[in-house]
Image (cartoon, coloured by chain):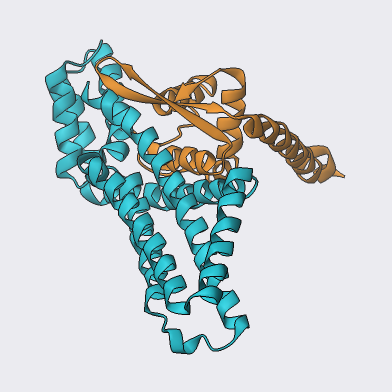
Chain colours: A cyan, B orange
Amino acid sequence: MSLSISQLKRIDNYLKNKGVEFWDVRFEFADHIACFIESKLEDGISFEAAFNEVENDFTRDYLRNQQKQVQKKLNKYIRKTYLKEIEKSVVRPLCLIVFFVLGGVLKFVMESYAIKYGLWIGCSIMIFSLGVIFTVSIRDFKMHKKSMLLNLSFTYVIFLTTIFQVMCIIKEELLTSNFLQLILIFSIVLISFLMYTWFNCYSELVKGQKKYYDLINS
Amino acid sequence: MYVCAMSNSKLYKGSLATIILKLLSQQDKMYGYEITQKVKGLTKGELNITEGALYPALHKLEAEGVLEVEVMRVDNRLRKYYKLTEKGEKETVSKLAELEEYIKNMQVLFNPKFGLE
């Protein structure tokens, strides 16, 4: 015996009110509860009686605790996806060529013109990558806001990009030796690479979530 | 509905991942509630896996790449199905061998004949 849309809505609202705010966490709990209620209906128990049982078992504290556990696992999943993306990018020839060319260009600009021009190019690349990531996340903001997976990965985006922006405050006077210049070039290339891979990882996560989000709203 | 960790004993807790893997190796894909009911049915109600124990275990296996998910629309709602990945299939074989070894050792240790000698 299947539940009606209004009964499913009631389960969903109950979970929302008890603090399960993210749809990508809620829908699995909702399905579990719905299956439980359906089995009770088959035993001849009314929806109200079965729902009361759910209210007794799925308390706010219990659901919050469950949500926290999901969060822990998702964090692990995000980090794993990112590492996989780095592994994939490292062996991608085009990606390697782009970053070697970028390094070469920076070295050439710093040596032939001035260090500050190299720094400007580096900063522009990083600010551009940041802009791209923000554009992607703003595009699906509604979905992003309500999905725990995207919410967590966006927190990583903010964290990483904040660290990366430290590069923008490096002063030309500090780069006195060739060695320090090389380190700077390497850092700019590495950071651009990490941001590129992060962007790919984030796009993949958004794509995956969008599929489910569209399904839930269809 | 059961909300305590697992009805029988803490002994089962360490075997939960193996139980999930074993069930999924026999069936293409399963969803959370189905797993709880399958275990309950197979053990004639002796073993009740609660959602509080099951879902964290499923999510852990998913994060480790042992399981993959497929979300489908069923009866006006979304349902998350879990199935074994290639890595999961290998993991199942090794986990089952590990469990078999464990049971064998336990039998040696707690064999009544051994105790009477």
Figure disc tally: 0
Instruction: Locate the C terminus of chain A and report the quarter of the image it occupies.
Output: top left
Residue A49 in the image: state x and y as whole percent: 16, 25
Q: Is residue A104 above or below residue B33?
A: below
- Judge whether residue A49 can be spotted in this image: no
Please tell me which residue is depicted at 45% across the width and 45% down the height of the picture: A200
Please tell me which residue is depicted at 29% across the width and 52% down the height of the picture: A134
Residue A155 in the image: state x and y as whole percent: 33, 57
Q: In the displayed image of the protein, which residue is found farthest to the right?
A: B117
Displayed quadrant of residue A147: top left
Please tell me which residue is depicted at 57% across the width and 63% down the height of the picture: A103
Instruction: Locate the N terminus of chain A and report the quarter of the image it occupies.
Output: top left
Q: In the displayed image of the protein, which residue is found farthest to the front?
A: A112
Q: Nearer the viewer, residue A76 or A160?
A: A160
- A200 horizontally vs B64: left or right: left
Residue A51 in the image: state x and y as whole percent: 18, 29
- Judge whether residue A50 can be spotted in this image: yes
Q: Nearer the viewer, residue A88 or B2?
A: A88
Q: Is residue B1 above or below residue A102?
A: above
Displayed quadrant of residue B21: top right
Residue A13 in the image: state x and y as whole percent: 14, 35
- B8 horizontally vs A66: left or right: right
Q: Nearer the viewer, residue A142 or B97?
A: A142
Q: Is residue A174 above or below residue A186?
A: below
Q: Nearer the viewer, residue A195 or A43?
A: A195
Please tell me which residue is depicted at 59% across the width and 44% down the height of the picture: A94
- B20 horizontally vs A57: left or right: right
